[in-house]
Image (cartoon, grey):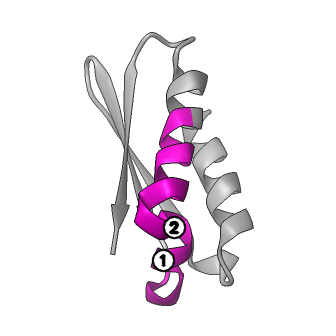
């Protein structure tokens, strides 16, 4: 569910939605989501002073409380 949420939010933010990729890495106690967007859209996903990235991480952690796992979002460039 978290993967679809991040994909949806990222596609809404960027100019090139086809360039959005989300990889899911499952661990025992945590899940890592790697978000990759085209190089021209990295700034749109991060935002000024990282505000958009922080907001996405907040939404993601709220959505992940049901599963009881910790979710980490990494934005790759």
Query: Can you say whether 77 is above or below 26 in the image?
Result: below
Instruction: Give neighbour class at mark 2: few <14, some 14-19, many 20+ (Cα, 10 Å).
Output: few
Secondary structure under the numbered disc 1 in the rendered image: helix
Alpha carbons under labels 2 and 1: distance apart: 6 Å
Which residue lies under the disc numbered 2? 47
> Is residue 54 shown above or below 76?
above
Residue 17: percent from left, percent from top: 68, 75
Circles 2 and 1 in contact, beta carbons < 8 Å: yes
Residue situated in front as seen by the camera: 49 or 15: 49
Name the residue rendered at 62%, 55% in the picture: 7
Residue most extreme to the bottom: 40
Q: Position of residue 19 (x, y in %)?
A: 57, 79
Q: Nearer the viewer, residue 61 or 50?
A: 50
Give the position of the C terminus as an image quadrant. bottom left
| Residue positioned 55% across, 46% down in the render | 56
> Is most of the magenta stretch helix, strand or loop?
helix
Residue 64 shown in magenta: no
Task: Please identify the quarter of the rendering in which residue 18 is found.
Answer: bottom right
Graded by Cα atoms within 10 Å as few (under 14), some (14 to 19) or many (20 or more), the crowding at tag 1 reads some
Q: Residue at x 43, y 59 (%)?
A: 50
The residue labelled by disc 1 is 43
State which region is magenta. Answer: 38-58
Q: Nearer the viewer, residue 18 or 11?
A: 11
Horizontally, residue 66 falls left or right of residue 26, namely right
Q: Position of residue 73 (x, y in %)?
A: 39, 46
Q: Position of residue 29 (x, y in %)?
A: 28, 17
Residue at the outermost left position: 28
Q: In the orientation shown, which residue stands out farthest toward the front?
A: 49
In the picture, measured across the screen, residue 7 lies left or right of residue 39, that is right
């Amino acid at each position: 569910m978290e993967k679809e949420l991040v994909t949806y939010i990222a596609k809404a933010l960027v100019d090139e939605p086809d360039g959005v990729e989300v990889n899911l890495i499952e661990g025992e106690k945590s899940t890592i989501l790697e978000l990759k967007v085209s190089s021209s859209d990295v700034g749109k996903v991060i935002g000024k002073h990282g505000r958009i990235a922080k907001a996405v991480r907040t939404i993601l952690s709220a959505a992940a409380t049901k599963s009881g796992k910790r979710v980490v979002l990494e934005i790759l460039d």
